[in-house]
Image (tube, grey):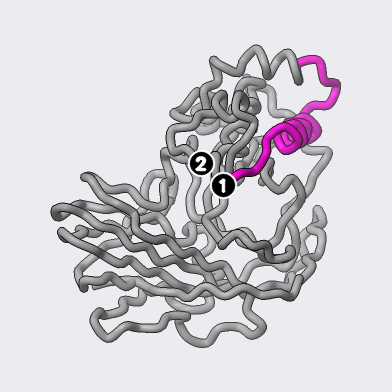
Amino acid sequence: MGTCWQSQQKHDNIRSCRPRCFHRCPNPPSVHLKIGCQLQLSCDSATPVLTLVHPHPTLLEDLLTPEVVQLLPDRSFEVLSDSCGNRWSRWLAPAGVSYFRFATSLSRPDSTDLVVPTAPTCPVERLPIETYGYLNASTYCDTAALMSVAWDTFGSMQQQGWGLVQAICDWVHQLIRFDYQAVCTEKTASDTLRERAGVCRDFAHLAITLCRCLNIPARYCTGYLGYTGIAVAEAPVDFSAWFEAFLGDRWYVFDARHNFPRCGRVLIGRGRDAGDVPFLRSFGAHQLLALDVITEALDQPATHSPLEEPTAAQSIMI
C-alpha cells in the first residue's frame, strides 16, 4: 500500500522573506508549504526500489499534516532511516509501469538562511571526528583533480572561515552557467569546472570539492526549495541541491547555485555527494517515465493531507 500524490501549481505572487538574524526569536514567524512528488517508472521485471523524498527527521516536528504515500499498483512499503537520518521508502516495483506519489505540508521559518560572517575556520586538529569523512574525495567530488586549482585560487586569501566559503560560492556561481541541457548523471566536480555548465547538484559538488581541498568539511544536501520567496520562472519545480560547510562548531548552509540567502528550504537528505542521496535508486533496470515535484507556499495552514486519491489505490498516512 502506498504514499501520496500531488499536482503542480505555480504562484505568480512573489513573497519576500525576513533576513535571519543571529539571535533566534522565541516564536519566529513561519511560512506554510505544500511539498511532494510524483514519479512514474517502468521495469521489465519486479525490481526493489528506494525513494528518498521524505523530509529529514529534524523537520518532523514542523509537519502540519501527515505524510501520505500512494503506490500504484497498490502494494506494501516501509520507511527506513539510514545512519545519516535520511528517510527512505522501500518497495518492490512490479513488472510494467508503477506510480509513486508523496505529499505533506509543513511550516518553515519565514526567514532566510542564517548568515554569520564571523564564523571561523575550525582547525583540522580540532574538528569533531564525525566531520573528517567530509574532507575525503567521493564519487562526484574528486578532490585530487582540483587540489591545485583550490590552492592556487584561494590559498593566499586573507579571508578564512565564512568569508572563504562565500568566496568559493561566488567563484563557482560566476564561473558556471546553469543549464538543464548540461545534465549528466556521471559528471564530477572537475567535469563541471571543465565544461563551465551544470545544474544545482553540479554547483554544489564543485563548491564542496573546493572546500574539502582547503580542509573545510562540506556535505551535500538535497531537498525541496522551488520558487519559495522568489519570482516564478518557466522551468518546472525540481528537487534542489545545496551544501553545508562546517565552521567553528557547527554546520552552515551555503548555496553556490543561487548564491544568496533563501527561505523555505525543506531538507530531505545529507550525504557525501549526490550518489548518497538520489531521489530514486533501483536495484535493477528501470526507465523513469515522468517526475513532478511540488513546492508551493500556502495562503492558509493546511488542515488535511494535500492528496487527491485515485480510486485504484489506497493512501497510507505516516
- Extreme front residue here? 181
Given residues 31 and 283, the one toward you in this image is 283
| Amino acid found under the numbered disc labelled 2 | Val
Q: Can residue 26 be seen at all in this image of the molecule?
A: yes
Q: Position of residue 183 (x, y in %)?
A: 51, 41
**Mark 1 lies on residue:** 180
Find the magenta span and give its range. Answer: 154-180
- Extreme right residue here? 158
Mark 2: which secondary structure? loop
The structure residue drawn at horizontal position 74% and vertical position 68%, both measured from the top left corner, is 26
The structure residue drawn at horizontal position 27% and vertical position 62%, both measured from the top left corner, is 78
**Structural distance between the alpha carbons of marks 1 and 2:** 6 Å
User: In the visual, does 282 lie left or right of 20?
Assistant: left
Mark 1: which secondary structure? helix
| Amino acid found under the numbered disc labelled 1 | Tyr
Residue 210 drawn in magenta: no
Given residues 213 and 131, the one toward you in this image is 213
Q: Position of residue 175 (x, y in %)?
A: 72, 32
User: In the visual, does 172 lie left or right of 107?
Assistant: right
The structure residue drawn at horizontal position 67% and vertical position 62%, both measured from the top left corner, is 233
Q: Position of residue 273 (x, y in %)?
A: 49, 37
Q: Quadrant of residue 108?
A: bottom right
**Mark 2 lies on residue:** 183
Q: Position of residue 215 (x, y in %)?
A: 64, 22
Which quadrant, please, contains the N terminus? Answer: bottom left
Where is 252 relative to 268, above or below?
Answer: above
> Badges 1 and 2: C-beta atoms under 8 Å apart?
yes
- Tell me if mark 2 has few (under 14), some (14-19) or many (20+) residues whose alpha carbon lies within 10 angstroms of its own: some
Where is 313 relative to 273, above or below?
Answer: below
Which quadrant, please, contains the C terminus? Answer: bottom left
Residue 176 drawn in magenta: yes
User: In the visual, does 88 lie left or right of 17?
Assistant: left
